[in-house]
Amino acid sequence: REASDQSQPTNKTRKMSSSLYPLAVTTIDATPVAGAEPPMVEFDKLIPATKDDLSSLLLKDVTATETKKDGTPTLRATSLTEVQFRDAVRAEAQRIGAKAVLISVHGYANTPSSALSSARVAQDRLGPDVLVIPVLWPCADADAITSYKSDRTEGAVGAASALRALYRKFSQALDHPELPVSILAHSMGNFVLRLFAPDLGETAGHKYEHIFMVAADVDWKIFDADRQEGGTAPPGFAGEPGDGARIVGAAKEYVHVLYSSYDLALVARFFFNTFITALGRGGFDESKVPADLKDKLLKVNAGSYSLDGLSFGTRVTAHSYQFTLDACAYYKPFLVPSADEETKA
């Protein structure tokens, strides 16, 4: 179903703690800080990504400790257990007055600091009603074009493996009945989500309120009937049968597919991926989606979203619109329904 914008952009901001970011999750291998109590770790973008990554960490008070010659900082944070993280989420939500949590998974060629900066933009634009928690996964230390293949074959695969190891305790750490949790994946972050899909759904014991797939770098046929369990997916299909159904099954309410035919970054992706159209550029074909999935899918044409405030190059590619004012205005009513909407429901 086509979904339209449901509110006007908001400029509400929240009080940030003095750290670079208060709470985060990372699948980047980190180095323990000797003698630190409570336990602390350090990490940066230069730690290589491998597809057999299994480690992931729950972090509090991420700060920048030094800046390298290339301008990127080394990050330091307190490492928490799942119980400590659960308490920290509750405390931070109470501090800012949050009524919901949004987990944000970034795309490829992002440094940890750039992903945290993006999360801060999201936090400011969504306002204090929503607590944004970024997931940082390791991307190659290279430019956006040359790093695409390594990020997809190494970093994203490793991130999915690490999240798989973390998923149950992470879900328990976010198990706050008073705080519904949604997830937003941008660009290749959706490939991480797709790889992680076998762990999602009914058997996982945890569901996200909403799942937002923004400018998704996955096959646009992922929700088609012949891509589900028992289907006849053609040779070379970029995924496992049933991934689409598992993603839909992990949402209590809706899976939102935000796409734009103006997305030039996903045109380049088309040539990198044997001429397979991306979900984030074409959306999905409703006529080919099974009825049981279609009822929980919202198809959102983001081509009209204003790109004001983005750099010239970013506006040209029309790809990084995930936290523009228009995009945040779309998410907000789903993340925090108004009292009137709750009454109608």
Image (tube, rainbow, N blue to C red):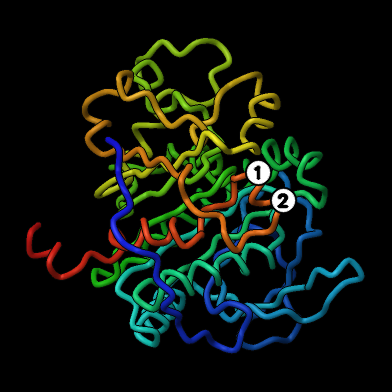
Q: CA distance from mark 2 to mark 1?
A: 6 Å
Q: Toward the viewer: 331 or 73?
A: 331
Q: Classify the position of the C terminus by image quarter.
A: bottom left
Q: Is residue 122 above or below residue 241?
A: below
Q: Residue at x 74, y 35 (%)?
A: 149
Residue 236, position as x, y percentages in the image: 58, 15
251, 206: nearer the viewer: 251
Disc 2 packing (10 Å; few <14; some 14–19; many ≥20) = few
Q: Which residue is mark 2?
A: 313
Residue most toward the right? Answer: 69
Residue lying farthest left?
344
The amino acid pointed to by label 1 is Thr
Q: Residue at x 80, y 68 (%)?
A: 72
Residue 106 x %, y %: 58, 54
> The N terminus lies in which quarter of the figure?
top left
Q: Which residue occupies the foreground of this view, 8 or 254? A: 8
Q: Position of residue 234 (x, y in %)?
A: 50, 10
What label does residue 307 carry, if any?
Answer: none
Residue 64, compared with residue 239, is above or below; it is below
* SS at circle 1: helix
Residue at the spot of label 1: 317
Between 59 and 217, the one lying in front of the other is 217
Placement of 341 over or under 233, stated as above or below: below
Q: Residue flagged by tag 2: what amino acid is it?
A: Gly
Q: Callout 2: helix, strand or loop?
A: helix
The answer to the question of whether label 2 and label 1 lie on touching residues, with beta carbons closer than 8 A, is yes
- Identify the residue at image location x=55%, y=65%: 25
Is the residue 118 above or below the residue 63 in the image? above
